[in-house]
Image (tube, grey):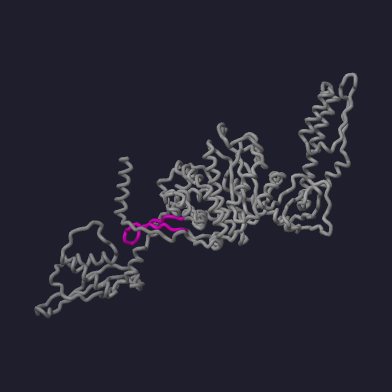
């Protein structure tokens, strides 16, 4: 049958023979197939030699051959009907003989049933799946579903949680916008198994609160799980803070306070996010604090909980100068940890360590820095002087700008003294000078300012200023210089620098949270919703960093938004068409990933497609009947 181009029909052909039992002449029947060959000619071939069929009337013979043709073409009747016993017996017997003799190529018939008229093809329900598939595999790799089930989540709640966290990673938005995205754009529910018809913004809101209730268990699990997956030891711990602002008044909030905004939003209340991160970017501990808390006041609570979230008892804690007060450094040492930080103040009386060479080092950003070990009588800590030409140029530019502005303020005072109607009273002039100094505190120490006045009228007659050469030269000499301080026993300048430079990883974590995962601003009105919102972003960050960590080990350093863009090139689509037997064939299938996405899948050891194909076949008449019933229900509703 494989050589024939198309099946036409099955019919009976008879010849007159003498019946051996009766001795009479009767019809001897053969079952014949009609088909078109490759040259489009109609040909015939005998399928079965049946013999005499004296018990079947001509009408019954017509029905038998029609039923055999229908079975061959998979055209089953839509409605069951009462069938003649003679017809039924012949059809069943002959069909079994045909199958046993392998006269029909059933596989070819099945292939024919899959042949769909191209003019009837329609594509619908196209959804993004690549980025969701990356995150879902990571969710499973981190064993978060099993954890949630042990924490009292039902299977449905765990599926919803997976849907929400993956959505936050791929499409960070409000609960309302996330709901629309899941229902209209994403195939995430097809991966997690959550019923998309049940999804609402309120369920997402409650799910976030539910996840926040098991925050500590999740953080501890994720910390241990990533250490085991990637064989990490947490020998170096990074600690820093950032803040994000609210787009609401937050009148009754315990958390939201006015403070020093890193986004320069002086008009908005803030909340502080504190993170402990290892050098691979994985969060060990997080905390949400009041927006006006001082940086140096946050470390004691972190140190108390650090041992519960890390596996290394003698880790090096790397922190910024704002947190590194003497009391905090003492506390870190008392808990058995080492510290490495930027000195809060520049050393004045210090000397280079004898017999130690000055090191010139090229950084990853192709900038040259100078490293020099120095000693001081202040304490026994190791200090490393770092001088950066780039930093010196930046500080020089800022210095010149502030000095220019300071002199412009002094020039205004000078002009007022000599203009009619200007401020001349001596005390007022000194007040104006004081305000200028307060406005530019970094510039004013390097100026000598003298005001002359008329003793009789107590009015200022002149103001003269000039830079102090000694102080100014010292300032220029110190540009671009800062000091690293540690209580480690390591004395190698490059090692100390490299350890401190890992603090860039926590800066990257904050950048990802704020920019790629849209952690700012916050629109929630109550504190519980705010905490849940921040925790949801941190959970999404776990997925993101787990993926990026593996990619970075293979020299793929793309930002998360670019990885999502690449993932979104893979879609899943429903294709519908009508086959040879007038049945509607529906196939849901994933597109092939492009080369960039394949490279990512290969590194993460992920299948190219979440599922190969999902197929259903519905008879056209039946489909119309179902659609009619649905239309009636809609009208009645």
- Is residue 564 among what the camera can see? no
Left or right position of 322 against 525:
right
Residue in the image at 37% along x and 63% along y: 115
Pinpoint residue 75: horizontal percent, then vertical percent.
Answer: 28, 62
In depth, the one of 482 and 558 nearer the eye is 482
Question: What secondary structure do most residues of the magenta stretch adopt?
Answer: strand
Q: Nearer the viewer, residue 287 or 193?
A: 287
180 in the magenta segment: no
Q: Which residue lies furthest to the right in this view?
A: 455
Residue 179 horizontal/vertical position (percent): 47, 44
* Residue 529 placement, left or right of 370: left
The picture quadrant where one finds residue 456 is top right
Give the extent of the magenta segment.
572-590
Q: Position of residue 608 (x, y in %)?
A: 50, 61
As drawn, the residue found furthest toward the top would be 456
Point out residue 203 in the picture as x, y percentages from the top left corner: 44, 43
Asked if the magenta segment contains residue 580, the reply would be: yes
Above or below — where is 451 with respect to 220? above
> How many discs appear?
0
> Where, quadrant-wise, is the C terminus in this rendering?
top left
- Please give left or right for residue 127 compared with residue 408 in the image: left
Front-lying residue, 613 or 374: 374
Residue extending farthest to the front is 334
Confirm whether residue 88 shows in the render.
Answer: yes
| The N terminus, quarter of image | bottom left
């Amino acid at each position: 049958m494989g050589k024939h181009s198309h099946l036409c029909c099955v019919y009976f052909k008879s010849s007159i023979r003498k019946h051996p039992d009766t001795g009479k002449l009767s019809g001897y029947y053969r079952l014949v197939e009609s088909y078109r060959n490759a040259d489009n000619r109609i040909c015939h071939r005998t399928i079965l030699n049946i013999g005499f069929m004296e018990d079947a009337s001509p009408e019954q013979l017509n029905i038998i051959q029609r039923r055999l043709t229908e079975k061959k073409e998979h055209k089953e009747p839509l409605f069951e009907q009462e069938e003649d016993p003679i017809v039924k017996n012949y059809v069943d017997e002959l069909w079994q003989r045909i199958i046993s003799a392998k006269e029909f190529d059933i596989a070819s018939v099945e292939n024919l049933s899959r042949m769909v008229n191209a003019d009837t093809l329609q594509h619908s329900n196209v959804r993004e799946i690549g980025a969701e598939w990356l995150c879902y595999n990571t969710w499973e790799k981190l064993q978060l579903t099993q954890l949630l089930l042990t924490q009292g989540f039902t299977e449905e709640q765990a599926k919803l949680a997976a849907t929400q966290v993956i959505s936050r990673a791929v499409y960070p938005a409000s609960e309302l916008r996330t709901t629309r995205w899941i229902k209209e754009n994403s195939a995430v529910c097809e991966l997690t198994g959550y019923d998309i018809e049940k999804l609402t913004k309120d369920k997402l809101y409650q799910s976030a609160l539910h996840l926040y209730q098991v925050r500590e268990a999740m953080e501890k699990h994720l910390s241990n799980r990533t250490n085991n997956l990637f064989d990490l030891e947490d020998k170096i711990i990074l600690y820093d803070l950032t803040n994000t602002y609210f787009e609401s008044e937050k009148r009754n909030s315990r958390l939201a306070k006015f403070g020093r905004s890193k986004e320069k939003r002086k008009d908005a209340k803030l909340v502080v996010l504190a993170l402990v991160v290892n050098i691979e970017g994985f969060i060990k501990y997080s905390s949400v604090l009041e927006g006006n808390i001082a940086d140096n006041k946050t470390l004691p609570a972190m140190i108390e909980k650090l041992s519960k979230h890390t596996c290394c008892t003698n880790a090096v804690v790397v922190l910024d100068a704002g947190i590194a007060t003497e009391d905090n450094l003492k506390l870190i040492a008392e808990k058995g940890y080492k510290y490495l930080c930027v000195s809060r103040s520049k050393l004045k009386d210090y000397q280079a360590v004898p017999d130690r060479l000055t090191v010139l080092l090229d950084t990853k950003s192709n900038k040259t820095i100078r490293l020099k070990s120095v000693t001081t009588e202040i304490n026994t800590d190791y200090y490393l002087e770092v001088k950066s030409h780039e930093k010196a140029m930046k500080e020089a530019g800022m210095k010149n700008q502030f000095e220019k502005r300071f002199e412009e303020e002094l020039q205004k005072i000078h002009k007022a003294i000599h203009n009619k109607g200007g401020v001349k009273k001596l005390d007022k002039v000194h007040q104006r000078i004081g305000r200028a100094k307060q406005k530019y505190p970094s510039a004013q120490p390097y100026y000598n300012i003298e005001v002359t006045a008329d003793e009789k009228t107590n009015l200022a007659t002149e103001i003269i200023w000039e830079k102090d050469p000694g102080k100014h030269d010292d300032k220029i000499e110190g540009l671009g210089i800062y000091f690293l301080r540690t209580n480690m026993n390591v004395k190698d300048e490059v090692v100390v620098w490299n350890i401190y430079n890992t603090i860039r990883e926590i800066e990257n974590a904050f950048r990802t949270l704020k920019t790629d995962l849209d952690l700012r601003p916050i629109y929630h009105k109550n504190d519980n919703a705010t905490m849940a919102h921040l925790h949801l972003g941190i959970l999404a960050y776990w997925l993101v960093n787990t993926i990026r960590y593996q990619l970075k080990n293979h020299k793929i350093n793309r930002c998360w938004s670019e990885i999502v863009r690449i993932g979104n090139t893979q879609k899943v689509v429903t294709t519908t068409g009508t086959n040879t037997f007038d049945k509607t064939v529906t196939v849901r299938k994933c597109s092939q990933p492009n080369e960039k996405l394949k490279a990512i899948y290969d590194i993460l050891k992920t299948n190219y497609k979440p599922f190969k194909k999902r197929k259903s076949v519905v008879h056209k008449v039946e489909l119309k009947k179902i659609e009619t019933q649905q239309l009636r229900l809609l009208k009645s509703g």
